[in-house]
Image: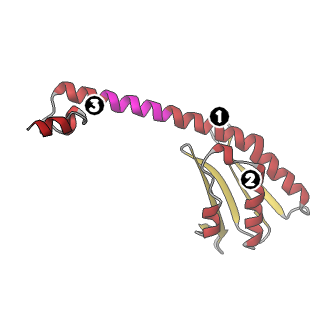
């Protein structure tokens, strides 16, 4: 019996009792709400950082790259957040090549390579190369990373 008490002492009260007490349920609820608020704030800050990096680094880098190509070869489109009119993503492509999308998605950054079908719909290409180009934090949204994504697009023409 004492072994059970020693082991359960490390666990929250609600994890080892067959029927939790109301106080235990209230504590569990309070802990969940507190953790959720911390996570929501972290996501909010990350989204703000992503928007800032897209506007300050990604878009200027893509316009610099676009300027190096003949007119009409390199295209880009920004994706905006409807609520604050800030850029939350960007799509770019070279004539005849795949579309590369860099998007903010719930505090994460998604990099996708899309190919247009005959009917005009886009389908995602699941390639090892694009997996290696994944961006895990706003700090990774650098000019160098954008250049490597453009090179990847050229490689898949």
Please name the residue that numbered disc 1 is placed on: 84
| Mark 3 surroundings within 10 Å by alpha-carbon count, few (fewer than 14), some (14 through 19), many (20 or more) | some
| Identity of the residue drawn at 65% across and 67% down | 129
Please name the residue that numbered disc 3 is placed on: 28
Splitting the image into 4 quarters, where does residue 18 fall? Answer: top left
Q: Which mark is residue 122?
A: none
| Mark 1 surroundings within 10 Å by alpha-carbon count, few (fewer than 14), some (14 through 19), many (20 or more) | few
| Identity of the residue drawn at 53% across and 34% down | 42
Please name the residue that numbered disc 2 is placed on: 77
Distance (Cα) linking label 1 and label 3: 36 Å
Give the camera-side residue of 107 and 135. Answer: 135
Q: Position of residue 132 (x, y in %)?
A: 63, 62
Nearer to us: label 3 or label 2:
3
Queried whether the magenta region covers residue 39, the answer comes back as yes
Residue range in magenta is 30-40
| Identity of the residue drawn at 17% across and 39% down | 16
Snapshot colouring? secondary structure
């Amino acid at each position: 019996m004492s072994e059970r008490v020693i082991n359960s002492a490390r666990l929250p009260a609600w994890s080892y009792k067959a029927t939790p007490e109301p106080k235990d349920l209230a504590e569990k609820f309070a802990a969940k709400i507190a953790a959720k608020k911390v996570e929501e704030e972290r996501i909010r800050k990350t989204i703000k950082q992503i928007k800032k990096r897209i506007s300050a680094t990604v878009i200027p880098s893509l316009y610099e790259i676009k300027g190096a190509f003949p007119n009409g070869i390199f295209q880009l489109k920004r994706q905006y957040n409807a609520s604050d009119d800030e850029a939350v993503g960007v799509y770019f492509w070279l004539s005849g090549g795949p579309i590369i999308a860099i998007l903010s998605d719930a505090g994460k950054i998604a990099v996708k390579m899309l190919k247009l079908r005959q009917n005009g719909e886009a389908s995602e290409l699941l390639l090892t190369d694009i997996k290696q180009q994944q961006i895990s934090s706003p700090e990774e949204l650098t000019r160098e990373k954008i250049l490597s994504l453009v090179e990847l697009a050229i490689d898949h023409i």
